[in-house]
Image (spheres, grey):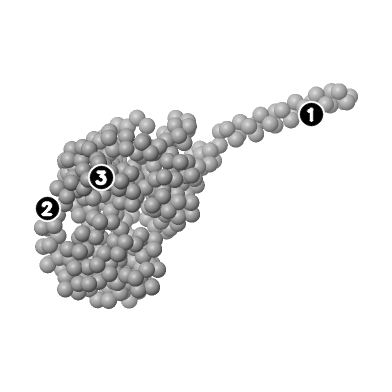
Amino acid sequence: MNTKLGHIVATALLAASTMTMGASTAVAQNLQYGNYLPPSHPTNAYALTPLFDAVREESDGKLNVILQAGGALVGVKDTLSGIATGLVDGGFIVSIFVPNEIPLNTTLSDLAMLIEDPVTMVGALNETVLLDCPACLEEYQDHNVTYLGAHSTTAYSLMCQEPVKTLSDIQGLKIRSSSDVYGRWLNEIGGVPVSVSVSEAYEAMQRGLLDCVYGSVGWLKSMSLWDVSKHVLRQESGGFGGGALIAFNTDTWDGMSDESRSMIVDRVPGALARLAVGYITEDEAAVQEASERGVMVNGKDPEISALLAEYQKSEVELAVAKAGERGAEGAQQLVDAYIENLKKWKKISAETGGDVTLIEEALRREIYSKLDL
């Protein structure tokens, strides 16, 4: 091969290589997704990790959503702003920590004391936001966020250092809380609410800043709280529901291909179904293992149950009033739709019987098949 011809061939090969590399770079996407909760937490173990793994596999590695758990990139209070500014491409937005930024959506989380089982909640929450509340979606879009789905914990119990069986045992105890919604209830039963995120609860118990953690009994296992909480009152009152577990920066979302967006949306019902059942499963597993860890689990106290029944009656009116104080409009219509959806999904929950496949099919049929994302 003469020198001139060799130069032409080399130039052509270099150009082809550069074009191939450019095409590969243009096609492949690596997105950063933030969740302040640890990798072992149900939101990651049952929902986000399997969802992102499935998307990566189907796309042959061209769409990689990289889960940054444990607050590696964003914390619980700055996830919304992190998504809005593009610091992360998506993340878990906890409404109760940003109530003034998403005042209408936070109304649903303010109804914490109406929490039913997670299957009922995941259906009611997402049908309400995605199908019945355009203003809820617009509120997220105002922060450059595209909402895809929310979840709910199981109803909360008290996990304490000292024996707690009755209402009288709670008086004066310092109890982990994360918003006024829970704080009001803890005050009602004689506790002293202390604002601590779930990721900080273990250390706070160790340091004596808390006597109890108010949360899902499954946290005994997933958050290792059974090391510091040897007594449980399984009262099942309240819980967290709402926010946005699955949400992306809108610029990122709009920049994806239709195929990539479909890959993600198609897997959201399955992720939410697994998480709903996973929460229930983890609660039961934790209770079964509790005795082996030296934990005493007590059942409901009738006196607290009676207080809760009365307390719930004021929750709707108070949630609407607080939304108004935050400047949200349309809160009453939102709550009305939500309550109707709770009734609908309580029936669906009973019909699906904790079967992940049936729950996924119900979420797809009733909600996600009707979306244009």
Label 3 secondary element: loop
Other residues around mark 3 within 10 Å, as few (<14) / some (14–19) / many (≥20):
some
Q: Position of residue 158 (x, y in %)?
A: 26, 66
**Looking at the picture, which amino acid does disc 2 mark?**
Lys
Front residue (pair 228, 154): 228
Q: Circle 1 is placed at which residue position?
A: 10
Please give the count of numbered marks on the rendered protein. 3
Instruction: Point out which mark residue 313 bears.
Output: 2
**Looking at the picture, which amino acid does disc 3 mark?**
Arg
Q: Position of residue 289 (x, y in %)?
A: 33, 69
Q: CA distance from mark 3 to mark 2?
A: 22 Å
Q: Which residue is at 28% across, 56% downward?
A: 179
Is residue 328 something that shows in the picture? yes
Q: Position of residue 373 (x, y in %)?
A: 37, 32
Disc with the residue nearer the chain's start (2 vs 1): 1
Q: CA distance from mark 2 to mark 1?
A: 79 Å
Q: CA distance from mark 1 to mark 3?
A: 66 Å
Disc with the residue nearer the chain's start (3 vs 2): 2
Q: Circle 3 is placed at which residue position?
A: 326
**Looking at the picture, which amino acid does disc 1 mark?**
Ala
